[in-house]
Structure formats: structure tokens, C-alpha cells
Image (cartoon, coloured by chain):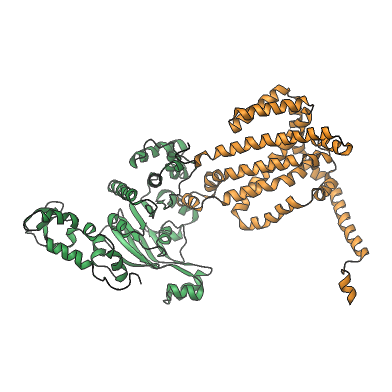
Amino acid sequence: MTDIKISINSLSKIFGDRPNYVMQHVLNGMSKQQLLDEHGHVLGLNNININLSAKRLHVIMGLSGSGKSTLIRHINRLIEPTSGKVIIDGENLMEMSQDELREFRRHKASMVFQKFGLLPHRTVIQNIAYGLIIQGISEGEAQERSKRWIDKVGLTGFEKHYPAQLSGGMQQRVGLARALATDAEILLMDEAFSALDPLIRTNMQDILLDLQRELHKTIIFITHDLDEALRIGDEISILRDGEVIQTGDPQDIILNPADKYIADFIKDINLSRVLKIGSIMEKTTNASGPKLLSNTSVEEALQIMNSTDKGIAAVVDVKGKTIGKVSIKTVITAIAHSDRDNNGPRYK
Amino acid sequence: MLEFFEEFPDMSRGDLRDFKKVIDSAFRSFSRTYGEAIESFFDPILWFLIWLEKLLLATPWPIIMLVIAGLCYLGARSWKLSLGSILTFALIGYLGMWEDTMSTIALISVATLLCISIGIPLGIWMARSDRVQALVTPVLDVMQTIPIFVYLLPVLMLLGIGKVPGLIAVCVYAMPPIVRLTNLGIRLVDKDIIEAAEAFGADKKQQLFGVQIPLALPNIFAGINQTIMMALAMVVIASMIGVRGLGIPVLQAIQNQYLALGLMNGLAIVALAIIFDRVLQRYGKRLQNYRKGPNND
């Protein structure tokens, strides 16, 4: 496995006047609703334990109120936890002094916000340079170093514009470039693309994936959109009522949802586009038919198989070695199988 | 028993007199002991005011007119406004009010500088601490509502008649807007933007000077504008305690029923107010150019 970059250990957060006092009730197993009704405290996060691997894109998915924005703000300690640890590169973030914490935010973790959080009185280039200026680099040098990020996010020619003069998508590209310009290893993205319309959102996802292929940052990406999570995530954690209910890679989550809540979610997505043939193939080293890469989507595979006589295909890995086979029938079974549970209430 | 309801059970006349006497004599002895020290504390401000007044009076009038037109243009970027201010000052001079106008400008400038240098830091402090805000707000309310003559009295007892008590009277009345609007402007800065600055590791000072003050500037300018307007409104009152300027002729006009004299000097004060206001408002608007959307740049 890859090495662990960020380790979140039994992290809990309670909002209210006396969080430490009611923490005991939570440890004794009191539910979120009970805590709110009887003590007037909101349980934001309950005993979160996740390990995030270095250089991967980790998506944390949950509906509003699930605590996902609270969780990401613990990773750079914009919010103080009630209990628990966040260990980054072996160092507990919660034990850092204010000065150490500022250094950490300046150099190790940068953030992209849902509402962009740009400085309206600074131009595009000045905004991108902001993180560097906070680091103590002079305005001139910071802007010089920011220039290459302008190109990377496709904003050449807009250097001297103010944020209010740009569209939402372009503003978020400024936000992304600002976060990348500090060369931080960790990138925190809080619903970064949620405020954008669907086409622009897909476009931004592509930009992010392209950049990630080159930069290999450790990215924590928050979203409420399962399609987005499945599209960009190397790994996904699903959060509900302040608890992590499943962590796994996208294929794993689609094929083996941990509970009905997640299964309900998956029902709404276009499985044939998300499911890869590698995760439903029958393992064999000997197969006939057209050769398809294991990360080909089921949708594409169906089109190709449909145009052949037998309706089968061989699955190969990146080196071209045959590792399995699929047929139209296996594919249809996989899609149909995942679509069970049509009865019953959608949400708990 | 009925008596209790018919007449308010007040302090006896003798007690009340003694009570007042104690306060009066305490303040008198205070002013006797510390009066001079307090007076010398204000000396630098007095010297600055006298120096500025002398400078304005000694400078040939065409140069003053040019400087005013230049400042108007720098602030408002409008030739019309510059031309208008030149014509106004020409008329003021032609009607024999040049010297009084210079004195008034000197007083207003010093009072405004004083208000800004105390008011903006105080406003920033209020914005950063709810406790300070809770403490200062009622003081500002008192400063704005207490009848001017009531707070003039102790100032006069302490410092006598002259420029400094006049200046203090003007500042007490004119300072609240700049304090309030600085506080408000900083508190209104978008929380998301502050959070972003924090996430990038900005310390308190970087947040204040890099984000909060620049984004609060339009409000701070509105405060400065209000302060100047209120200072101008105090010119006549200030002249009652010995400050030279356009207020003196107005006072004479009231005492002797000289309608023309009162109107002319009063309108000169109004003209100054309009020029200051327009220039500062345009400048404040220019500061917000970055807020304009894609279609109006």
C-alpha cells in the first residue's frame, strides 16, 4: 500500500456551550438526535477514524449536515476538535502552537472554498500570489512565481482582471491556482465545484485530474455529489450524521455498498458509466474477442461488444496482458443486480 | 400618606445644594491642580493649528486656489468639480470672506486629522472585541446627544476660552461617525474571505491590513465624510468660545440682526461642505471600482 499522509484518530466535535461535559454521553453511545433533544448540543463529528494515503485524491462524500465541511476544517485546524487527533506526517496537528499552525497552513496545506473566498480588491494575479505573500515573499517575486499557474489553469490574459469581472468557473480556477501556488503537498477542497453549473463542473474536474496526474498532491475533496465522487476519487469515504459509514475505492463502493443508505445513493447514478469492466470481469488468462483495458467503462464495453458477433471481450491490463473476460450478459447482470431495493423509503 | 403620592420624595434643598457644591469644588480643585498640565498636553495640537492657519493666510490666494483645484481633481477626477470649487472660492474671496474661510479650513483640517487618528484605531479595536464595542457604543451615544454647552462647561473651566477648547468641542461631536463606520465596515467584511486568509496562514496583522481594512475602506471613507460634515456644522459653536473663522461673523449677525452677513458666511460654510462632500464621495466610489462586474469596466 501507499504510505499514510494524514491519519485521523477518534476525532469528535460537539458544537455547543459545554462540549467537554456532554462528550461523556457520546462516549456512552448517545445518539445525535438524543444529544440535541436532551442537552442542546450538536454532534458534528463522532469518532472519525480514517487514514488518507499520500498523493491520492480522497473524496469525502455526504449530504448537508453530515459533517463533511466540519471534518475538512479539522485537517488545517480552522475548527478545534472536542477530542481526537489529526496526525500529518507523524505530527499531531492539535498539539501545534499557533505559530507552528500558521507555518503549517502557509507551507503544507492549502485550501479551495465553495464560495471561492477570493480577495475582491486584488486582481487575478494578486489573488494567486496571495499565499506566497503570506509566506513573506515580496509582492513582485510572488507575482512572478504565480505566472505559471495562470497558464496551468487557463487564465492567460486575465491577470489584471478583478474577481467580480470573471464567471464562477473562472473565479474557482483562480481559487485553485492560488491553492497550488504555495506548493503545499496537501490540497483541501471544500465543495470546490458545487457552486458551478454542471458543464463547468465537469470541466473543472478534468482540470483537477489533469493537474493531479502531473503534481501528485494529497487531495481531500469534499462533495455532496456521488457522481462527482465516483468520477474523480481514488478513494471515497461516505459520511452520515458525523460518522464514516464506508471507505473504499469507487468500484468497491458501487459493488458492495455497506448499508441501505449507501445503496439508496447508488441507485440514482448511471452505473454503466461509472462501473469499470475490471471490477465485474470473470478472471481468466485466456479469452477471445476485442481487447479492452480493465478501466474501460461498462457503457463503452457494451457498445464495442454489441458490434461483434459473439458479444464477448477480453480484459487486459495496461501492459496488454489478458486478465479476464466479459460478455454482454455479465455486464447486464452487474447493472441489473446493483439496481435492487426498488421498494422501501429512499432515506432513513 | 397621601403626601407621598402628591409630591415627589426629593432630596432636601440643603442636601442638594451641598451635593452640587461638593462636585463643583472637587472639579475646581482638579482644574486648579491639573489645568496647566492638561493645557500643555494639547500644546502640540495648538501649535499645529496655528501654523496651518498662518500658512494658509500667508500663501498667496492664486496658489491656494490652484492647490484646491488640484486636490479636487486628484480626489474626484472631475474637471467640473475642480472648476466649480475655483469659482466658489473666487466668490468667497470677492465677498471678503477669504481670511475667515482659511481659518475655518485650518480648524476643520486639524479636527478631522485628530478624529481620524483617534477614531480609526478605536473603530478597529471595537471591531475586534465585542466587549470594547459594548463599552464604547454608549460613550459614542453620549458624545452625539449630550447638549454641546454641557460638555463645553468643564472644558472651559479646565482650559479657558481659546482654540483648543473649540477644537475639543468640534472633535467630541464629529468623532463618533468615523468610529462607528470603521467598526461597522470591518465587521461587515465577508466571513468567507477572512476564513480563506486564515486558511492560508495569515496572522492577525496580515488579516487586518491585507483584508479587513482594504475591504472596509468604502465605509471608513463614508465615516471620514460624515466627520467633516459634522465638524463644519460645529464652526459657529466653536466661534462662541474664541475660535476664528466663518462662525464669528455669523455670531455677530445673530446678535445684531445683520441678515446679509449671516447669509453670506452661512452659505460659505455650506459651500465648503458641498465641495468636501462631493470630492470625498467620488473618491470613495473610485475605491470600489473593483466591485464592478464584467459589463461596466
**Is residue A284 visible in this depiction of the protein?**
yes
Q: Is residue B153 left or right of residue B269?
A: right
Find residue B273 and report its image quarter: top right
* On-image quarter of the N terminus of chain A: bottom left
Q: What chain is colored green?
A: A
| Rendering coords of residue A228 (x, y %) | 31, 56
The tint of chain B in the picture is orange
**Is residue A293 visible in this depiction of the protein?**
no
Task: Determine the residue positioned at 73% across, 33% down.
Answer: B105
Task: Determine the residue positioned at 79% across, 45% down.
Answer: B38
Find residue B272 and report its image quarter: top right
Find residue A49 and report its image quarter: bottom left
Closer to the camera in the image, A24 or A291: A291
Q: Is residue B88 left or right of residue A239?
A: right
Closer to the camera in the image, B273 or B189: B273
* On-image quarter of the C terminus of chain A: bottom left
- Vertical position of residue A280 compared to residue B142: above or below: below
Closer to the camera in the image, A89 or A131: A131
| Rendering coords of residue B83 (x, y %) | 65, 26
| Rendering coords of residue A114 (x, y %) | 41, 53
- Vertical position of residue B62 compared to residue B270: above or below: above
